[in-house]
Image: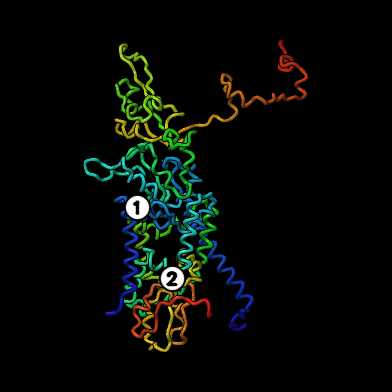
Amino acid sequence: MTNMKYLLLRRITQITLLVLYFGANAYGWRMLSGTLSGSSVLGTIPLSDPFAVLQLLAAGAVLSFDVLLGAVIITLFYGIIGGRAFCSWVCPVNMVTDAAAWLRRKLYIDKIEHKVWVTRNLRYYMVVLALLVSFVSGLAAFEIISPITILNRGVIFGFGAGAGLLVAIFLFDLFVLKNGWCGHVCPLGGVHSLIGKYGLLEVEHNHDNCTLCMKCKDVCPEVQVLNMIGKRSEGVVKPECTNCGRCIDVCDDDALGFHLRNFLTK
Amino acid sequence: MGKQKPVISERRRFFTSVAHNAGLGVLGGLVWAGYADKAQSSPLTLRPPAALAEKEFLRTCIKCTLCAEACLNRPSNIDRETGRPRPATLKIAKANTNVTIGTPYFVAADVPCYMCDDIPCVPVCPTGALDIASVTNDKGELDYREMDMGLAVVDQNSCIAYWGIQCDACYRACPLLDEAIKLKYDRNDRTGKHAFLKPIVDMNVCTGCGLCEKACVTEKPSIFVHPREVALGRPGSHYVKGWDKKDQERVRDAKAIHTIDKRSEKKPVDYLNEGVSYD
């Protein structure tokens, strides 16, 4: 039985948030209402998705103070935590793509099928493109196709045809491109890479304990960030690391763990 | 002329890769922008109270759904018997409907807007897509009379009151009773002894709440709400009401335009008769 501490903690966080959002609508709970695009904590503290706000601004919106404050709060929160903590601990689509990645491993798809290569920088191009299309169309461009908010709203209000997009993403990750959506395409992941670049929390590798079993690389959704495994003792500094902690879970040798980044001695 | 591998210089590699990436970017952008164009709502969409004009609304709404949640959970919506909320007026658009995904709207024939005193859907909007100033009166209070979601339109061919059958369902359902919908009494010449009670909508009072559409007894409602953009015509600024002092103000400084050309030198009677022979 492999260790599932961080996996379980993440699922608990993700599902708790969805339950709170659901209850806010269905039962009038006040703890956390709205969606991941824009929320309200206890009916007073605004939270909003900084990428959505950027798109609205690109589309030419004149926004109220609340939504701007919400974006600042969220940016600071994830900026201080570091990594793409949103992606692996909050975003509900992570559960869909993790399921696809799990099934992909079980079916040995990477051993049987040809691998498709797509640059992982695609997400940053998607950020730029989303802002350009928002500017041209006067409509927040990613927000009309985002599977994240479709899943989020689906849980609260029912899915409708939006469920098709989630199935599509599952199939895309399963049969087309390994870690395709979260690891290559999603521009919100790109934005969170940039936000969390200088955060405190990071995974650190202890080379002396490593037995080169490579289990961490099997499960990592952003394999390129683990380039130091078996080579050097150092922290994961690449911004695409989602801080999901799955590598720490699967490591039997105590060669990986969360650490607070030390800015003073480096 | 043997088979020679083309030499690919670094420079060629660079320019090809730039063209490749730019081309993919343009391709993606075109598809995306094309979809964004299709994703705009139908012009018949009714938005929540205080919503900005459709174009502004779409670029400002962040799709947080707080308005719809406030609408559902407002105290006045709780069913006294079950203790549970009734279906909310505001719905959130799903994919592949004719309303932009994630944005709030309502369908008057399903659940109309009940024009709450405290307008709970508006103050929760974090972006200003629902503009609280537009439902605030001169005293600085929230005022449902300031709402403007659309305008009720009567189809006089289908409305049975216009046939002479007595029906005042819409008149009585209207929250602004005898203001937004008035009954016009006319003599029924067909019978010679009955009256018509014809509903007439006052466009300056009607908020577009849709209670009349919900109440209408005909199979498909004969009074229905459309956004004002759709429901109203526009005469154009060149028509001036000569009997309306306020409208006259618009043309106070207007100057008459006199076209002067060679023909103007003669009187019309003369130039019209020029060259006509009466033989």
* Mark seen at residue A30: 1
Kind of residue sitting beneath label 2: Gly
Measured along the vertical axis of the image, is residue B196 above or below residue A264? Answer: above
Q: Is residue B45 visible?
A: no
- Neighbour tally class for label 1: few under 14, some 14-19, many 20 plus, Cα within 10 Å: some
Residue B58 position in % (x across, y down): 47, 48
User: Which residue is found at the position 71% from the left and 14% from the top?
Assistant: B269
Chain letter of disc 2 in the image: A
Measured along the vertical axis of the image, is residue A23 above or below residue A210? Answer: above
User: Which residue is found at the position 32% from the left and 27% from the top?
Assistant: B172
Kind of residue sitting beneath label 1: Arg
Describe the element under mark 2 as helix, strand or loop: helix
Rendering colour mode = rainbow
User: Which residue is found at the position 48% from the left and 52% from the top?
Assistant: A66
Chain letter of disc 1 in the image: A
Q: Closer to the camera: disc 2 or disc 1?
A: 1
| Residue carrying label 2 | A183
**Image quarter of residue A177:** bottom left
Measured along the vertical axis of the image, is residue A211 above or below residue A89? Answer: below
Viewer-nearest residue: B25 or A211? A211
